[in-house]
Image: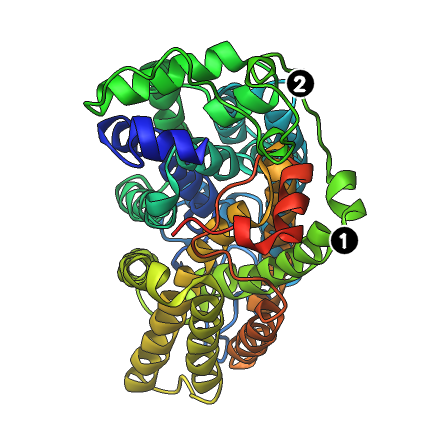
Amino acid sequence: MDEMLEKYCGDFGLWQMRHLVLTCLAWLLEGILTMVMIFADREPAWHYLTSHAGTTSRCSSEPGSWEWSGGNGSSTMSEFGLICGEKFKVGLVQSIFFAGCMIGAGVFGHLSDTKFGRKGSLTIICILNAIFSILTAFSPDYWTYVLFRFLSGFSTGGTGLCAFVLSTEPVGQSWRGVAGMSTLYLYSTGIVVVSSIAYFIQPWRSLYIASSIPSLIFVIFVLPFLHESPRWYLVRGKVDEAMKIMQKIAVSNGKQNIPYDVVLALDSEVFKEDIPNSQFNIKKAINGSILDVIRSPVTRIRLFVAVATNFFCSIVYYGLSLNAVNLGTNLYLNVALNSVSEMPAYLLTSLVLDRIGRKPLAIGTMWFSAIFCLVGSFLKSTDETWKIVRMVCGLLGIFGISGTFNLLLVYGMELFPTVVRNAALGCSKQAVSLGAILAPIIVVLGGGVPFAVFGACGIIGGFLVMYLPETLNKPLYDTMDGLQEAEAKPGLVTLD
């Protein structure tokens, strides 16, 4: 596949650019659907209706002596009474959403590698996203709201995963790192979009309905123009369908038609020199599962380290994002600034990715974030000046960990072959969701504790990356056999 892209189709031309942009619009959906809860579950302003001499807490005030400034429907906290002894339920529903993400990532990771493919799975996911988001808006009570947030998490968990693999698999080796690092720009844009929507549409029910509209637009106006991954067709034994897409890529990129005597071959077939060329187009579907990844000594350690690294990275990223409620600054502005601060990180890491490699860059960005988190843990939010300094530490922490988060997607894709790629990335995404489950609980602790925990997680994650191999200038493998053969013959694994 990589050889055909380089020789006949073009590593990254007009077709790949269009495909990348359209597919990555799904990341905008994930940003909206994930971060909408920050605003839907926020604590609204309130005021006293009667004299409250000596009383400054709602929990110790007489019933009816105060009210929510925006009415009971302004957030789930005000409508469902999630204050005082019930305040833990705000963090609970957010954690349950990420629990749904964890399960959905595993399910859709497996389905996209097997029956439904990358595009088919993404179609199902986006339809479910719209349905569950609308149903959430009509939740009559707290526990129904929890149920629909879990189901929303289930569908959201596979969105970015399927979109990332679908958008980057048709890209050639020389551009794959840069293309992969570009995908999360739209995730950050989605957070800015939902911040803007929430500023103008503050009632939580209306906000959830508004946040479902982009998913419907994507299903109707974008998905029909996307193609399935030719790599998925190849490993499923559908060589003709894969070749049709490769021909489209070549023509769209201004290349000549691929010669009729040139046909796609799996990497495991290339290493078997006794197979005649005429047999390359006679294939059976090759299946793989996460058990194959665990059984192989080559991929086993990669999986365990990737899962652990993504777990610690997730705690830092989602923790810093959710911790905006503890900073005492404007919530809408702070969330938007956090997302904007991610974009320079994506640009910087993409510029140096192919110069210094995946491994040192991942370590450096995690430790950069950890340093500012630790500094923030020692700052007291006693006045406005220190609040702003702590907010800056949070922004720089987000800057560093965003670069890591984006990089780990590219890194993870290159560590595993096509036949198990989404399943392995699904495990990493599950680890991300597990970290996100813990993040709201850490944020609830308040003070300098969250920053200290985030700093420790960043340091540990950096040390874990040291156990992963460098993947710079290495091709994407199709099968487990192809990867193992290449590892056994080091001279075959680079594409310089």
Q: Is residue 319 left or right of residue 351?
A: right
Q: Quadrant of residue 224?
A: top left
Q: Check disc 2 and give the amino acid type.
A: Ala
For mark 2, give the secondary structure: loop
> Residue 243: image x %, image y %?
43, 15
> Residue 440: image x %, image y %?
58, 60
Q: Quadrant of residue 401?
A: bottom left
Front position in the image: 91 or 2: 2
Residue sitting at 35 percent across and 73 percent down? 396
Q: Is residue 205 left or right of residue 485?
A: left
Q: Label 1 belongs to which residue?
A: 297
Front position in the image: 40 or 44: 40
Q: Residues within 10 Å of mark 2 (few under 14, many from 20)?
A: some
* Between discs 2 and 1, the one toward the N terminus: 2
Front position in the image: 399 or 233: 233
Query: Residue 285 got which mark?
Result: 2
For mark 1, give the secondary structure: helix
